[in-house]
Image (spheres, rainbow, N blue to C red):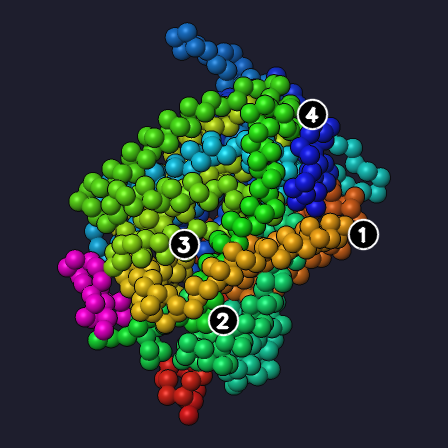
Amino acid sequence: MENLDSNMNIEEVNDSPIEQVRLTVPITDDPTLPCLTFRTWFLGIISCSVLAFLNQFFGYRQNPLYISSVSAQILVLPIGRLMAATLPTKPIRVFRWSFSLNPGPFNLKEHVLITIFANSGSNSVYAVSIITIVKAFYRRRLNPIAAMLLTQTTQMLGYGWAGLFRKFLVDSPYMWWPANLVQVSLFRALHDEEKRPKRGMTRLQFFLIVLVSSFAYYIIPNYLFQSITAISFVCWIWKDSVKAQQIGSGLRGLGVGAIGLDWATVSAFLGSPLATPGFAIMNILAGYIIVVYIMVPIAYWNNWYEAKRFPIYSSHVFDAQGGKYNVSRVLNSTTFSFDKQGYNDYSQIHLSIFFTFAYGLNFATLAATLSHVALFHGRTIWEQTTASFKDKFGDVHTRLMKKNYDPVPQWWFYSLLVLVIGLALLTCEGFGRQLQLPYWGVLLGIGLALLFTLPIGVITATTNMQPGLNVITELIIGYIYPGKPLANVAFKTYGYISMSQAIMFLQDFKLGHYMKIPPKSMFIVQLVGTIIASSVYFATSWWLLTTVEYICDPSKLPEGSPWTCPGDDVFYNASIIWGVVGPQRMFGNLGLYSKMNYFFLLGILAPFPVWFLSRKFPNRKWIRLINMPILISGPGGMPPTRAVNYNMWFAVGIFFNFVVYKKFKGWWARHNYILSAGLDAGVAFMAILCYFVLQIRDINGPKWWGMEIDDHCPLASCPTAPGINVEGCPQVH
C-alpha cells in the first residue's frame, strides 16, 4: 500500500499516489457548474430531514434499521432532473438579490451537495441516547431546552477540530478515505455518459440490476423467512448441548459455522466490506481469530473472573448469583448518585467474558493508535506540517481545488468553535445542573477530542476503520467524578462525539475534494445539515419517548412490540458500569477486573515490533500492512456486533478484495463500489416499504418457525457453573 510508506517524499504528482483512487476518481473539473441552487437547498433539506426522522424512528426498534445517504443519493436524481425540466427559468428578484429556480440541467455538483445534506441526516445523534436513558430507563425529568442544546452542541463541536486538521486529513493525497470511493463510483455511474460495452452493460445499468435484485430479495429475510439472517448449523445438530450451542451460535456465542443469507447481516454493524481495503480486512480477521477463538475459550472454560456463572456473550451486567444487576439497589433515588451502603449489601458488578475482553481491547486500541501513528506517520505528518505552510504538497486533486476555488477561512471554524463551547458550558452548568457535568468536565472532554482527532483521523482515512473514544472518556470521568451517571455519559458524548463528528466532516470534505465542490459551499451545507438533522433527531426521540407507553422496557411492553431499544440498552448498562458504580469498583483497586489495565501497556507496545521489522526488512512490503490498532480492535465491536456478522463480513470482503481484485481488476474498478451502493440501497428501500405498507398496520408475515428473529440456539446464553439457576437453562450440578 503506497499510502502507508511514510518515507515517501511528498511531491506533486500527476494523479493520486493511491491505486484505488486512480482507478475511481476523475482528474477533471468544470468550475462553471452552479452549486448552491434552489434545487440543492430544497432537495437537500428534505433528504436530511427524512433520513434523520427514519433513522431515529427505526433506531428504537428491536431490529434497528440504518438508512444511509446512498438511498437519498439515488432518489433525488430523477426528482432533480424533473425539476430541471419543469421549473421556470426566469430569474426571481428579491430586493437587489436575484436567483433562478432553474439555472439549467441538474448537475453533478448539486447532486453531491444534496448527498452531503443527506449524510448529515443519516449519521445518528449520540446525545439522543442520553435523553433516552434519562426518560425511559432512569425515568427522570429532563428540561427539553437543555436536551435540545445537548444534541446541537455535541454535534457542532467537531467543526473546530475539522478546521484545525483539514490540511493533513483532506489536502494530503495519502489520506484517501476509502469509504468515499463508493459514493464517487455511484456519482460517476449516475452522471457520466457512457457507451455500453459490447456484450456488457454500463455502470448505471449494472447498478439498477443490483438495486432491483437486492430490493426484491430482501423481502425474504425481512418479512417472510427472518431466520436466514442467522443460521447456526451446530445448534441444529446438538439441540440439548449448552457447550455446543455456545460454540456454534452466531448471535450469542462463538459463531463456528454460523452464516447469514442477507446483506443486512453482512453490513449492518461493520459497514460494507466492499469499501474496506483488503489489508484492513486481514488485520481484523487476525485479531478476531486471536480473541474469539483463542483468548475467550481459554478464559471461559478456565473460569476466569467466574465467567461460567454468566453467558459467554452478553452486554448486560450481572450480580454474583448470575442474575441481571438490579441498579435501583445501588442508586440513591433522591440525589441520583451512587449508594455505597446499598452496593456493599448487594453485589459487585460482573460482566460476561466477551464484554470484559471488549473493554480490554478498547483500552489497547486507543493506546496502540497513538504509538502507531507516531511511529508510522509521525515523519509524514511533520513533513506535511512544514509543507502545508509553504503550500508545496498535493496531488492533482489538491492542485485543482486550490486553483479553482477559495478555501474556507480559518476564522469561520474558530468562531463556530468558541460559540459552541460557550453553549456547551451553558447546557451543563445551567438548567439546575440536570446533566451533572461541571464546566471543567466539558473543557476536559473537549481537550481529549482535540488530542485524538488527528491520530484517529489518520487511521480512518487509510483503513476505513474508526477506533472510538467512548471507553477512555468513560474511564477518565468515572475516576475523577464517580457516582454520577449523567455526568459520565455527558462527558463521554462531548469527548467522543465531537471527535467522531470531526472525522465525519473531514470525510465529507474529502468527498467534496474528489468531486471538486467549492469548499465554502461544502461548509455551509454541512453546517445547515447538522443543525437540521440534530433538531429532527431530537424532536423524533422526544415524541416517541413521550407517546409510546413503556418504550424500551420489554418486560412491560405488549408481546411482539418492536420498541425495545437494543442500542440504548447497551448505553444504559455502560452508564451503570462507569457512571453509577465507577471504574474504581470495576477496573481499579476495588474491582474485579483490574488486570484489564495491562491492555493499555499492551497497546502502547504492540506497534513497536512491526515498526522495527519494517525498518529492518524494508523490502518485505507485507510487514508494513500489519496495522496493530486495527488488528487489536478487530473483534472490539462485540457486543453488540455478533459472530455471524463478522463471519459474513469476512467472507464477502476477502472474496471481493482479494480474489476479484487480483483476478478481475478491470471489473473490480468499474463495479465493486457500485455493487456495494446497490446492495445497500435495495435493502433500505425494501425495509422502508415493508414497514410503512405492512408492518405499521400489524400485517405481519406467515407464522412459522422461520419467522423467529433467532438462530434457534436457546442454550447459548446459559451459564455453566454449578448452582446458578436461570429460567430455561438446564441445572448444572
Q: Earlier in the sequence, mark 3 or mark 2?
A: 2
Q: What is the x, y in percent for residue 97? A: 43, 10
What is the span of residues highlighted in magenta in the rendered image? 326-344
Residue at the image point whose x is 47% and y is 32% from the top: 164
Report the amino acid beneath label 3. Ile
Residue at the image point whose x is 61% and y is 67% from the top: 289
Pick the quarter of the image with the C terminus: bottom left
Q: What is the x, y in percent for residue 562? A: 40, 60
The disc placed on residue 663 is 1
> What residue would you read off at disc 4?
28
Q: Earlier in the sequence, mark 1 or mark 4?
A: 4
Kindly check if marks 3 and 2 are in contact, taking CB atoms under 8 A apart as contact. no
Q: Which of 272/384 is in front? A: 384
Residue at the image point whose x is 63% and y is 50% from the top: 276
Q: Quadrant of residue 560?
A: bottom left
Report the amino acid beneath label 1. Lys
> What residue would you read off at disc 3?
472
Q: Is residue 342 magenta?
A: yes
Q: Secondary structure at mark 1?
A: helix
Q: Earlier in the sequence, mark 2 or mark 1?
A: 2
